[in-house]
């Protein structure tokens, strides 16, 4: 039972590049197959992992050497790929957002249940060790009840090269589907309670990138806590400045690279050229390989966050947790990650090998999508949205 999980990958793009150091280095996982329509990605995968590449997702799902799949195809394919994998009895880790419609999430959960397999949603930043440790500290009771969470993140998300549908909200584009999914997961973990109500505004400030680039949301939770969430992907102020220039992936950032994302897009003349530019960051084209991946000094993070409890403010950062109590202030360090994002494989492994109920289950992912949709609805209608059991908006 201690054998590594035999994992097949569906979609070898940017998300896979970000998970590659984890999947290549974690001792509890072995990459045995991948499916992607891009031949250059399949060829690189076959060489690098001595494993089979498939053009067809159904063929990968039918392969008996595959025990679990990591679905990192674009959002719109998640529901179809989850159904296929479940039908073949494979355990599933599907990227966030789980899907674009609640009915699709419900169908994915039902398919997993019927097949008797585990369905997990991730990576999302609520797997990051500093947030898991902060949630543990909150739950310890040492600091009293959690009252108020303040979360913000300023990035250049909107100016990273995109496929056309990533700039169209109706097709899952914009920061609400892709980035609020992380921030909502983190504050839900820290609050330890489901969202009760949500009021939000969204920003669509650049007509050449006609989707949400920013939002602010105010949440109340069933346990009485509240949270304010601020996100801007407009590529100006960068909140990594508040975190010692440690980036989202735990990497060292160069403050002198200011404006790099906008400059990178300056020479792009068409949506096709932009998609091709994005593709240069995908597996099989980008230079980085599993062999080049090295351990990092710090954990992944999703911007500055403060959790205010009755008796202390807790501030998770990329290498630990700052604890501000009444009379004293102290830093609780976390060991540097041996393998980045190891927590994702740990949770999948614990579910599949030990039958442990995952935190990031299908139901969890569905509640996060419900909150993303509630942000869009609240911004559209100007009203506060009530959520029942964290899910049913409206
Ligand atoms: N957790 C994270 O940090 C993170 C980061 C980036 C993306 N993501 C998520 O990962 C998913 C993919 O986003 P991305 O930015 O990697 O996109 P991408 O365009 O870079 O990669 C998608 C990959 O899927 C392949 N693909 C396309 N259609 C397919 C199909 N029908 N079957 C199999 N493969 C197919 C493409 O060839 C490409 O290699 C999205 O849901 C996104 O939200 C998560």
Image: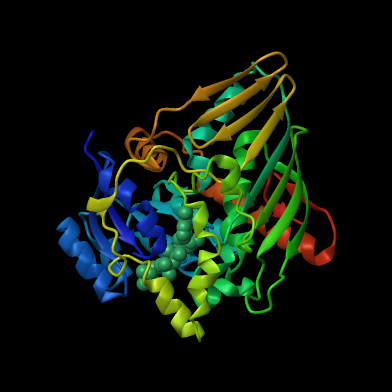
Please tell me which residue is depicted at 50% across the width and 86% down the height of the picture: 269
The x and y percentages for residue 233 are 62, 61
Please tell me which residue is depicted at 36% across the width and 55% down the height of the picture: 70
Please tell me which residue is depicted at 40% across the width and 47% down the height of the picture: 116
The x and y percentages for residue 260 are 51, 65
Single out the residue that lies furthest toward the top: 327
Q: Is residue 259 left or right of residue 6?
A: right
Total numbered labels placed on residues in the image: 0
Color encoding of the figure: rainbow
- Position of the C terminus, as image quadrant, is bottom right
Question: Does any portion of residue 238 appear in the rendered image?
Answer: yes
Q: Is residue 28 above or below residue 31?
A: above
Q: Is residue 49 left or right of residue 391?
A: left
- Position of the N terminus, as image quadrant, is top left
Picture quadrant of ligand 1? bottom left
Q: Is residue 203 left or right of residue 181?
A: right
Please tell me which residue is depicted at 63% across the width and 48% down the height of the picture: 184
Question: Does any portion of residue 162 appear in the rendered image?
Answer: no
Q: Nearer the viewer, residue 27 or 155?
A: 155
The x and y percentages for residue 376 are 72, 63
Q: Is residue 21 above or below residue 138?
A: below
The x and y percentages for residue 63 are 23, 60
The part of the image, by quadrant, that contains residue 2 is top left
The part of the image, by quadrant, that contains residue 343 is top left
Q: Which of 136 and 223 is in front in this view?
A: 136
């Amino acid at each position: 039972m201690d054998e590594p999980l035999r994992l097949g990958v569906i979609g070898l793009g940017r998300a896979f590049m970000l998970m590659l150091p984890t999947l290549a280095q974690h001792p509890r996982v072995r990459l045995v197959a991948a499916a992607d329509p891009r031949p250059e990605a399949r060829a690189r995968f076959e060489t690098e992992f001595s494993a089979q590449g498939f053009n067809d997702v159904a063929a990968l799902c039918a392969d008996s050497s595959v025990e679990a799949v990591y679905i990192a195809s674009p959002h719109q394919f998640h529901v179809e790929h989850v159904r296929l994998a479940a039908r073949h009895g494979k355990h599933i880790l599907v990227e966030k957002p789980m899907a674009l419609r609640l009915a699709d999430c419900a169908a994915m959960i039902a398919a997993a249940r019927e097949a008797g397999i585990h369905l997990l949603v991730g990576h999302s930043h609520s797997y990051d060790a500093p947030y898991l440790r902060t949630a543990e500290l909150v739950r310890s009771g040492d600091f009293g009840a959690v009252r108020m969470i303040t979360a913000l993140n300023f990035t250049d998300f909107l100016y990273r090269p995109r496929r056309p549908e990533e700039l169209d909200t109706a097709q899952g584009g914009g920061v609400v589907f892709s980035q609020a999914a992380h921030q909502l997961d983190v504050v839900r973990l820290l609050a330890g309670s489901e969202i009760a109500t949500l009021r939000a505004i969204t920003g669509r400030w650049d007509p050449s990138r006609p989707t949400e680039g920013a939002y602010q949301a105010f949440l109340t939770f069933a346990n009485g806590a509240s949270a304010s969430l601020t996100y801007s992907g407009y590529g100006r102020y960068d909140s990594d400045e508040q975190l010692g220039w440690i980036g989202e992936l735990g990497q060292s950032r160069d403050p002198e690279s200011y404006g790099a994302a906008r400059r990178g897009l300056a020479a792009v003349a068409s949506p096709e050229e932009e998609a091709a530019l994005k593709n240069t960051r995908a597996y099989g084209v980008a230079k980085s390989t599993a062999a080049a991946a090295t351990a990092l000094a710090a954990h992944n993070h999703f911007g500055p966050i403060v959790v205010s409890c009755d008796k202390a403010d807790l501030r998770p950062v990329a290498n630990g947790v700052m604890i501000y109590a009444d009379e004293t202030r102290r830093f609780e360090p976390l060991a540097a990650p041996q393998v980045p994002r190891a927590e994702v494989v740990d949770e999948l492994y614990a579910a599949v090998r030990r039958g442990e109920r995952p935190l990031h289950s299908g139901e969890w992912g569905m509640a996060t999508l419900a909150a993303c949709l509630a942000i869009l609805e609240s911004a559209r209608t100007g009203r506060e949205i009530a959520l029942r059991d964290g899910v049913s908006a409206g």
